[in-house]
Amino acid sequence: MSTNKQYSKFKAWIQASRPPFYIATIIPLTVGLVLSRPIHSEDIIMFSWINLAAFMVHLATNLANDLFDHYQGTDTDKSIGGSRVIQEGKIGIKSLWIAVASLYFLAGLVAIYITSIQDIWLLWGFIIFAFLSSFFYVAPPIKYGYRGFGELFVGINMGPIMVVGSYWAINSYPTWLSFWASLPIGIMVASILYYQNLPDIESDKKAGKLTLAVRLGKPGAYWGMVIIGFAIYISMALLILFNVYSIYCWAILLTLPLLFKLLKKIRNEKNWILLDQYGHLIRKIYLFNGIIIIMGLSIK
């Protein structure tokens, strides 16, 4: 294989992995780490293993979603969802299946190592829930993402499952503190998925993918974004008031203009396909608020 072909193939796999969405994984895992203060060298090592497994599952989820959306005709030419590597002929179906199976298998081996070395076999309840949620997001017969439950399960997985799970794997026991601290994280990741479905609301409806946005319809979907957007800030404010988050986390108010800007774009845009170009705003809300939460917890 020539150097150019190798580079093109490498770029295709990067495209399939959708790097910007990895922030959804790294932030909740890091919250679990900073809640574990004082942090020792062995905690950092365990955190690295946790990240490795989580990122493999995250990538496997993305690839599996591409596959099953392709099979069910959701990612058509008019759709802008997914990585588009199948539609553009950059990666074959067989290669994607091999990658998905390999990633889940390797992540499982890492999970076995973590739970055995820490003697926390009850954590397998979280691990199995995360695996099933990952695979059956769009995989039949469950395909809960097609039934309007995507945001709920993504919020649970990227909030409590990841934050509490990360804390549990590092400390060998869970805490209610890690659970409460995880809730705004889960809401923010759910908001990313929710917004991501808005540009595809028409194509998803035609394909029978009844996301929450499709079920609400355009007027309702706008107000859905208003509710989930302000739920982010209300939940964080309550956790600050109840001393779960540091008072320094009031810096989250600096990101409110991003939410107002996003809501204005949704309200004024007639062609919702064009909303895809503003997806960076919801990801920035999550990134900046996530960093503020992590820094606040670090100095609390």
Image (tube, rainbow, N blue to C red):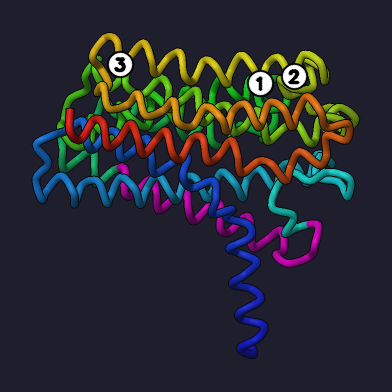
Q: Which residue is drawn at 31% across and 43% down?
A: 111
- Left/right placement of residue 269 relative to residue 31 reads right
Reading the image, the residue beneath label 3 is: 240
- Left/right placement of residue 24 relative to residue 74 reads left
- Left/right placement of residue 158 relative to residue 85 reads left
Q: Distance between the residues labelled 2 and 1?
A: 6 Å
Numbered mark located on residue 132 in the image: none
**In the rendering, at what x and y percent does residue 254 appear?**
45, 31
> Three-letter amino acid code at disc 3?
Ile
- Left/right placement of residue 187 relative to residue 117 reads right
The total of numbered circles placed on residues is 3
Magenta range: 87-111
Looking at the image, which is closer to me, 272 or 110? 272
Q: Residue at x 24, y 23 (%)?
A: 246
The quadrant in which the N terminus is found is bottom right
Reading the image, the residue beneath label 2 is: 221
The first of marks 2 and 3 along the sequence is: 2
Under circle 3, the secondary element is helix
> Three-letter amino acid code at disc 2?
Ala
- Mark whose residue sits in front, 3 or 1: 3
Q: Compared to 293, does 14 lie above or below?
A: below
Reading the image, the residue beneath label 1 is: 225
**In the rendering, at what x and y percent does residue 152 appear?**
56, 20
Q: Do the residues labelled 2 and 1 touch (CB within 8 Å)?
A: yes
The first of marks 3 and 1 along the sequence is: 1
Under circle 2, the secondary element is helix
Under circle 1, the secondary element is helix
**In the rendering, at what x and y percent does residue 128 appear?**
42, 30
Q: Compared to 84, does 250 lie above or below?
A: above
Q: Which residue is drawn at 36% across and 39% down?
A: 291
Q: How far apart are marks 2 and 3 (CA)?
A: 29 Å
